[in-house]
Image: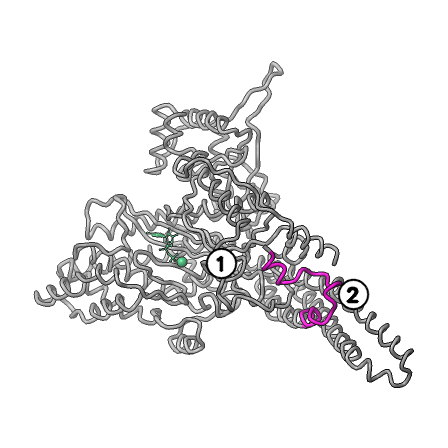
Amino acid sequence: MAILRFNAIKETLHRKPVDVNETERRSELFGRNVFNEKAMRQFLTKDSFQSLKNAIDKGYKIERSLADHISTGMKEWAISKGATHYTHWFQPLTGSTAEKHDAFFETIEDGSAMEKFNGAQLVQQEPDASSLPHGGIRNTFEARGYTAWDPTSPAFVWGTTLCIPTIFVAYTGEALDYKTPLLRSVSALDKAATDVVRYFDKKVNKVITTLGWEQEYFLVDSALAASRPDLMMSGRTLLGHSPAKGQQLDDHYFGSIPSRVLNYMRDLEHECMLLGIPVKTRHNEVAPNQFELAPIFEEVNLAVDHNSLLMDVMDKIAERHNFKVLFHEKPFQGVNGSGKHNNWSLATDSGSNLLSPGKTPMKNMRFLTFFINTIKAFGENEELIRATIASASNDHRLGANEAPPAVMSVFIGTQLTKVLDELEKVTDGKLSPEEKTDLKLNVVGKIPEILLDNTDRNRTSPFAFTGNKFELRAVGSTANCADPMTVLNAIVTKQLKEFKSEVDSLIKDKKMKKDDAIFNVLREYIKDSKKIRFEGDGYGEAWEKEAEKRGLSNYRTTPEALKPKISEKAINLFRDLEIMNETEVKARYEIEIENYSKHIQIESRILGDIARNHIIPTAIKYQNVLIKNVKGLKEIYGSGFKDQAKEQMSIIESISKHLEKINGGIDAMISERKSANALEDETKKAFAYCDKVKPHFEDIRYHCDKLELLVDDEIWPLTKYRELLFTK
Ligand code: ADP
Ligand code: MG
């Protein structure tokens, strides 16, 4: 094992940057491997082009005869890009992407062969996916699920495969993937938001959700990563003493990017351009070897697909550059973890951002309406939001003083706080002309200027308003963005519907003017949502106390945090908006709670194995060297040997103590694991893993890490933190 470590380091030290050929301009590469409008025009007949366009823009159904034409055009295009196979590409609830490749090639009767791909193959497939998670919806012996083409996300060629984005549903209609509920939430929000926007602008016919994610990750040399069984199997290091130098010098953030990494990034960005993923920024993050990548925002369905695709592409490109990408939220203890910020907003069909203040009081009232409704929705559903970002790996970040805390809150900045304070003073009932002028000129009218100088940014807030969008920062770096986006869309939809009905009833029953009615309702909302607003330091203990007083939830672990997902409130929310029925909601909970237990179980096994089969034998080997040394000293010095062997004896003793603790810890952990496994109820099992099995990790690790400091570096089996993090 030690050999593996030394060979890996040697290999790493001899690495050279892999050349990247970048001859063409990025704008020319963009979308070249995407079946976009340009490709559609070139490869489709006029009728099929129009039919596909209508499906994309208006959600119309594509006729069967035209589907055959479209598939033929798509196939010709894909072959021109070097594709030999096609696949329905989807996002099952495993958290990664799934695909099953079929060749275009088919033999025909006379014994020859031809390339074939028809409408039926494009539109629907039955992947043998009985082994994908379904939370009890689809008994394995029963009906299978099928994948169905989602024309709103364009097909693309990746490598030699035509990938067709699809949804994945059971024959009984229940969603078995992330995309289906997301699409349903997008259309629910479209309807609710369009109804509200029409108070301000009658020309709006559609509202879309926009998402711009920021993906953080670590890069580790592939040989070094391969020398760590914990990293390879669980995505994070379960052991390892922190290096002498960590991130305390802050010298990595925005520092210059090492050339090996830079070449990787250039290669990655090149591939992203071809695939139409509009990546824009790249920079170092806080921790050594940590980086971030962000695209230009897109319509949420496409943005989610692009994030999933990107994670796959990153893995593949990394292989070429001898890197391993770590998406885990906390690969190294004591070193900053990774997240995936989700920048979220709403835009009208004419391209105007509903969370962006405008030049006229009307635009600003529209802005305030969406702004305040979002805050209220977030406040009333903070538990559900917390549930949607919960995972075994994200538990390491939330509440660990580096990422947003486990308490959900909204940050809006001092300037907008002032605006809301002013609005709160609006009189109950009809506004006087003076009041209206004052509001329009001094409150609503001032917003754009205010935001321009609004430079305060609170990095500790889980949900921050950043000028023209809300940024959900608590999402884990391994997560699929679809789930948090579905929830955010759902709660805002519900809120906007309530808002509309309250405003309408003031207009109708109280004979208020539209402006008056809107101000009156917003005023109440501002009061209602004070509890969730917090401008201070989210990492501090003071906030936790304050949050408790306010009655906000503070779920520190996943089993606790997941519970609100199946509350009456959540079930009603999703059912009423037709985003998910009760079966679907419960199935997702089952999958997640089971995943949690499996995750901790795997980590526990790996830790037990490494500690017992790698660390203990190594420590004993070193102890034997010391024992031999002491014996030799005794031979030379006789009874006076103790003076000469004092230090050695003390190390021998320390080693024994640590060994005892490690071995005892592993025994106790295994016994807890057995008890947990015997539990039938998945929720109880998850709690047992969380409260009984996991606490042993820290103890076992502590003693292993102490041994790392004692044992001869020459024989230490595991690649150390300093080697993983600082070898360039
Ligand atoms: P930061 O300081 O957090 O890096 P930026 O202003 O650079 O913030 O933007 C971060 C992300 O916000 C980018 O990924 C960008 O695409 C996204 N973004 C910008 N405007 C919108 C919007 N209207 N809707 C959704 N995302 C947006
Ligand atoms: Mg950000």
Which secondary structure dominates the residues rendered in magenta? helix
| Residue type pointed to by label 1 | Gly
Tell which of 379 and 621 is nearer to you. 621
Q: Which residues are magenta?
A: 703-727
Residue 366: image location, x then y, percent: 22, 56
Q: Amino acid at mark 2?
A: Pro
Depicted 610 relative to depicted 48: above or below? below
Tell me if residue 725 is in the magenta stretch.
yes
* Residue 454, horizontal then vertical, whole percent: 28, 63
For this orientation, the residue located farthest to the left is 433
Tell me if 716 is positioned left or right of 544 in this view.
right
SS assignment at label 1: loop
Using the numbered discs, state the Cα–Cα distance from disc 1 to disc 2 in whole angstroms.
36 Å
x and y, in percent, of residue 157 in the image: 49, 34
Determine whether the residue tagged by mark 2 lies in a helix, strand or loop: helix
The residue carrying pointer 2 sits among few (fewer than 14), some (14 to 19) or many (20 or more) residues within 10 Å by Cα, namely some
For label 1, the residue is 476
Can you say which quadrant of the picture contains the C terminus? bottom right
**Residue at the spot of label 2:** 617
- Please state the horizontal and vertical placement of residue 134, each as a whole percent of the image: 55, 49
